[in-house]
Amino acid sequence: MSSVLSDIKKEYMISLLKNGKREDGRGLNDMRDLKVDLGIVNKAEGSCFVQIGDTKVIAGVKCETGAPFPDTPNQGVFTTNAELIPMASPDFEAGPPREDAIELARIVDRGIRESGAIDFQKLVIKEGELVRVLFVDIHIMDYNGNLFDAAGIAAIGALYNTKMAVLDEEGKKTEELMPLPMKKIPVPCTYAKIADSILYDPSMEEESVMDSRITATTEDSGRISAMQKGDVGSFKKEEILDIVRRSKVRGDEVRALLKEKFSEMR
Amino acid sequence: MEKDIKFFTNGKRIDGRAVDELRNIKIEVGVFKRADGSSYIEWGGNKIYCAVYGPREAYPRFLQKSDRAILKCRYNMASFAVEERKRPGPSRRGVEIGKVTQGALEPALLLENFPKCMVEVNIEVIQADAGTRCAGITAASVALANAGIPMKELVPACAAGKVDDKIVLDLCKEEDNYGQADLPLALLPRRNEFSLLQMDGDLSEEQLEEALDLGRKGCLEVYEIQKEALKKKYVTEDVANE
């Protein structure tokens, strides 16, 4: 958006926010409609489609085997990759992942890894030699703001949806299937800061004028497993604590919906 | 590639179809907000999204043509679309399919209406199950219509092939992997000309003729499904009731 236009838009948004209102009629703490569909890709071991408003994301899990990292011989390997494919926005271009896609993947990765959502030790087949290698690949299909939460929810959904082959002692696949050893449900909540207002689940328009954003990932017990401030602006301590408090409440709501979906699956 | 597989049982194929029968096809129009036009196709086990952007100014600028728009087609497969994880990012196979897709779609479009512009077609395979290029072209043509790109006609696509010395329509995975020939086709129905033609395997001249005829028949069935999908999107109930 040209800077003159975005300045006008920003002032309009700020005047709305002063009265606690947003352009699309939501309150500051409201998420757009969230839709979660599990198991949409049979070829993947696990998959999940997430829609937040008009933002659409698909995550898929593939399971392979390989050598563990030398410093963690008793743990499985977990890799998250995100692609901002040109399908999703006129501004995305083909090619290897750039800054934005790498940041997105790393925020999702940290939220899941650090929460202890996956029991990595149960992914070992032969210590120091052979472990499970998990790939979570996130495809952004339609970009209309807040990819962080959509991608994070899709990734955790796909992991819970995963049914992988039981392996024999040599690591060969058998016919039997088993779920991943999952322990927690980390949920990322992203807040945008526009002037002095902090709003949950920013739309694309809000992202285009925001000063800064924070993504806070909380897990079931309410503990924070990852945070990331993005873009140029800055936050006061009180604002950060406020975001964390709000993330727990919103995170629990998303978790409740996910749990419902997971129980339907079984 | 050939393997000992029983392709026919009582005249029916592995998945229970007759030799001239398509798999189930379902097309949805306008599935994305951001794109100028979009579609989603399920074709057998294939799940493919397509998004169209444009016409907009072509870049890099040296690609611009002073008398017409250029058509860029990108075919990409999700890493989780196949049994063995595919490495994300462009592949030589994908680049080639993008190119033949462009060649299949371009003759149907009135690109001369938009000098110096580009129209971009993005095909994203979420789940692959044999015949993704034909499904992609079919979906892309519908997405181009949804984007309002002027066109002379829709472009349906469908493969014919040979298994067990019989010519069959729309190969399934096993037939594709272990069959004797694969002939993906796209048809310009009003001109009755093919705009995609690839072949690998082994066909006699007679078999080729038979396969082209069968493929044409398949394309015409796909054409009807394309038209239905667009009508479903645009015909309002009032008009439908008249």
Image (cartoon, rainbow, N blue to C red):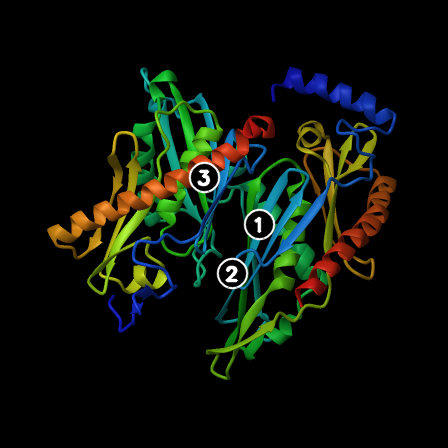
B10 lies above or below B148: below
Which one is closest to the eye, mark 2 or mark 3? 2
Tell me if mark 1 has few (under 14), some (14-19) or many (20+) residues whose alpha carbon lies within 10 angstroms of its own: many
- Front-most of residues A64 and B202: B202
| Mark 3, other Cα within 10 Å: few <14 / some 14–19 / many ≥20 | some
Spot occupied by residue A231 in the image (x, y as percentages of width and height) = 68, 36
Evaluate if marks 3 and 1 touch, with contact meaning CB atoms under 8 Å apart.
no
Residue type of the residue flagged with mark 2 = Asn
Dot 3: element: loop
Which numbered disc, 2 or 3, marks the residue that appears first in the sequence?
2
Question: Is disc 3 in the same subunit as disc 1?
Answer: yes
Image location of residue A92, percent across then percent down: 51, 35
Write down the chain letter for disc 2: A
Q: Quadrant of the N terminus of chain A?
A: top right
Query: Can you identify the residue that label 3 sits on?
Result: A94
Do the residues bearing badges 1 and 2 touch, measured as CB atoms within 8 Å?
no
| B47 to the left or right of B113 | right
Please name the amino acid that badge 1 sits on.
Ile
Q: CA distance from mark 1 to mark 2?
A: 13 Å
Mark 2 is surrounded, within 10 Å at the Cα level, by few (under 14), some (14 to 19) or many (20 or more) other residues, namely some
Amino acid type, callout 3: Ala
- What residue sits right under mark 1 in the picture? A58
Q: Name the residue: 83% across, 28% down.
A: A21
Q: Nearest the camera: A240 or B35?
A: B35
Q: Nearer the viewer, residue B20 or A9?
A: B20
